[in-house]
Image (cartoon, helix red, strand yellow):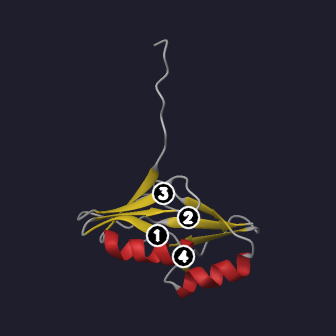
Amino acid sequence: MEHRPRLTLTSTVLDAPSAQELAVFYERLLGWSRRDDEADWVFLVPPDGGAGLAFQDEPAYVRPVWPAGPGDPPMMLHLDIKVDDLVAASAFAVSLGATVADYQPQDDVRVHLDPVGHPFCLYL
């Protein structure tokens, strides 16, 4: 193929038992606003532009295990979120419903699990 078509990543989509409930968590965590808001689909956008974050209902959702062991449902992706204060950002995430993962592979990163188990990393 001689001509490469333009491809633009517009969002990452997370499955959840309830798109609405998980969207509320990330809306509060990131301070982003809703562009699309349906019963089974929510799309959040950052205030300064760029790729968004979307959520969709998945009735057969299975919570991932991190780190996964043999036979565990593994994570399929994780989000990296840059912060200016790791301790404060971690406490804020926990106050919204995140949990700090038991396993922490790096000193300058805090791995958390969102309310439905998707891992996300806060880092300096």
Up-down relation of residue 19 to residue 11 (above or below): below
Crowding around mark 1 (Cα neighbors within 10 Å: few <14, some 14 to 19, many 20+) is some
> Would you say the residues marked 2 and 4 are in contact, meaning their CB atoms lie under 8 Å apart?
no
Q: Which residue is mark 1?
A: 33
Q: Which residue is mark 3?
A: 52
Q: CA distance from mark 4 to mark 1?
A: 11 Å
Upstream in sequence: badge 3 or badge 1: 1
Q: Position of residue 69 (x, y in %)?
A: 49, 61
Q: Residue at x 55, y 64 (%)?
A: 47
Which numbered mark, 2 or 4, is in the foreground of this view?
2
Which numbered mark, 3 or 1, is in the foreground of this view?
1
Name the secondary structure under disc 3: strand
Dot 1 amino acid type: Ser
Crowding around mark 4 (Cα neighbors within 10 Å: few <14, some 14 to 19, many 20+) is some
Please identify the residue farthest to the bottom as the structure is shown. Answer: 95
Q: Which residue is mark 2?
A: 47
Q: CA distance from mark 3 to mark 2?
A: 10 Å
Crowding around mark 2 (Cα neighbors within 10 Å: few <14, some 14 to 19, many 20+) is few
Q: CA distance from mark 4 to mark 3?
A: 14 Å
Q: CA distance from mark 2 to mark 4?
A: 13 Å
Up-down relation of residue 87 to residue 38 (above or below): below
Q: CA distance from mark 3 to mark 1?
A: 10 Å
Upstream in sequence: badge 1 or badge 2: 1
Label placed on residue 111: none
Which numbered mark, 4 or 1, is in the foreground of this view?
1
Dot 2 amino acid type: Pro
Q: Which residue is mark 4?
A: 29
Dot 3 amino acid type: Gly
Q: Position of residue 99 (x, y in %)?
A: 53, 80
